[in-house]
Image (tube, helix red, strand yellow):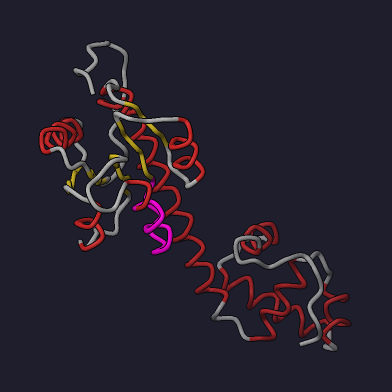
Amino acid sequence: MTGRSQSSRRGPQAEKPAGSALVFVIDDDVSMRRSLANLFRSVGLDVIAFGSAQEMLQASLPDVASCLVLDVRLPGLSGLELQTELAKLNLRIPIIFITGHGDIPMTVKAMKGGAVDFLTKPFRDQELLDAVVAATERDRKRREVEKAVASLQSSFETLSPREQAVMKLVTAGLMNKQIAAELGLAEITIKIYRGQVMKKMGARSLADLIRMAEPLGIRPNRPEQA
């Protein structure tokens, strides 16, 4: 880690991610841990620092957009081992590895494990800040997508089994007459079910409904008769 860049170009120092963002730091070197925390706070980011992987695993982590700046070599559980543990716990925090002893196999293992970046000391402050901004934005977008899918799933679960069957057939491209034949119902009944589906799902058009089907895992094929 070097001194901060004095370049006049507009960088992450002026581009704090929108909304709250949190950076977790794990480094057993007290001076490095303090230096990293000060750097992130200087651009308006919140920081929680730990001296070991075990400390983080035992902590109650805030449920906000975040990333983890993680030293590879740590006492006890190593950075790479922590990456594996977080994956097992389904804690998908974007990880930026930092190390003074990096090698190709280590880098490959970290990146295959889903790391956002792997920085070898000494690195520029700006380089680390770029990685942190990108990682927190990535986590924010993931959270937004998951929230939207959860909302869709909640709406889908308000549909009756028959309405769900109609939605699946509508989004598969079948016309009301075809759906009526598929389900053994009158066409006017299908029109009523279709209107109820549109209302409950909050769809303004057929295109809206089709876009909703994909994240719900609804595939364009005909289900068996409900």
Q: Quadrant of residue 185?
A: bottom right
Q: Nearer the viewer, residue 166 or 116?
A: 116
Q: Quadrant of residue 3?
A: top left
Residue occupying the point 67% across, 79% down: 164
Q: Is residue 143 left or right of residue 187?
A: left
Please tell me whether residue 84 belongs to the stretch shown in magenta.
Answer: yes
Q: Is residue 171 left or right of residue 10?
A: right
Residue occupying the point 83% across, 82% down: 187
Looking at the picture, how far across and down is residue 157, in whole percent? 55, 79
Please tell me whether residue 178 belongs to the stretch shown in magenta.
Answer: no
Looking at the picture, how far across and down is residue 146, in whole percent? 47, 59
Q: Is residue 37 left or right of residue 81?
A: left
Write down the region rendered in magenta.
82-94
Q: Point out the image quarter for the N terminus.
A: top left
Number of disc labels: 0
Q: Quadrant of residue 184?
A: bottom right
Q: Is residue 59 left or right of residue 197?
A: left
Q: Nearer the viewer, residue 47 or 49?
A: 49
Looking at the picture, how far across and down is residue 188, in whole percent? 79, 83
Residue 4 versus residue 120 in the image, above or below: above
Residue 21 versus residue 92 in the image, above or below: above
Q: Nearer the viewer, residue 186 or 75?
A: 75
Q: Point out the image quarter for the C terminus.
A: bottom right
Looking at the picture, how far across and down is residue 106, in whole percent? 43, 37
Q: Nearer the viewer, residue 148 or 117?
A: 117
Residue occupying the point 31% across, 34% down: 98
